[in-house]
Image: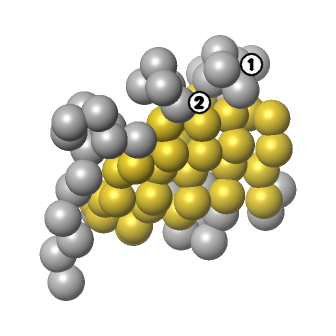
Amino acid sequence: MSLPDFGASDKGSRVQVSKDADGPSVELFDEAGKSRAVLGVTKLKSIRSGSTEVRAPSSLVLFDKEGKVVWEAPW
């Protein structure tokens, strides 16, 4: 099944629904266009190691206005 991609740049939309090879996700953006929440697959880069972690489709990650993770489940 193919999902439409509603990008954050589409007419000021603040929601992006997408599906890639890793799985589906729903992303919410603030008025400045910065990602504030992702439900589903997201890639998080570790500040310490520089490695990238792919979160599961069942995850929820919340970000502050600088893009830092403030809450996530599951851990």
Residue 22 appears in view: no
Position of residue 15 relative to residue 2, above or below, is above
Position of residue 48 relative to residue 73, above or below, is above
Tell me which amino acid carries mark 1.
Arg
Q: Residues within 10 Å of mark 1 (few under 14, many from 20)?
A: few
Give how far across and how far down residue 52 sits, in percent. Answer: 55, 36
* Mark 2 vs mark 1, CA separation in Å: 9 Å
Q: Kindly identify which numbered label has been placed on residue 73.
A: none
Residue at point 60%, 36% (across, down): 36
Position of residue 28 relative to residue 73, above or below, is above
Tell me which amino acid carries mark 2.
Lys
Q: Which residue matches tag 2?
A: 45
Give how far across and how far down residue 6 sits, in percent. Answer: 24, 52
Mark 2 or mark 1, whichever is nearer to me = 2
Q: Are marks 2 and 1 in contact (CB under 8 Å)?
A: no
Residue at point 20%, 39% (across, down): 10
Q: Which residue matches tag 1?
A: 48
Residue at point 65%, 16% (across, down): 66
Q: Is residue 31 left or right of residue 46?
A: left
Residue at point 70%, 43% (across, down): 62
Element class at badge 1: loop
Element class at badge 2: strand
Q: Is residue 5 left or right of residue 54?
A: left
Give how far across and how far down residue 75 sits, in percent. Answer: 82, 56
Give how far across and how far down residue 57 sits, in percent. Answer: 53, 68
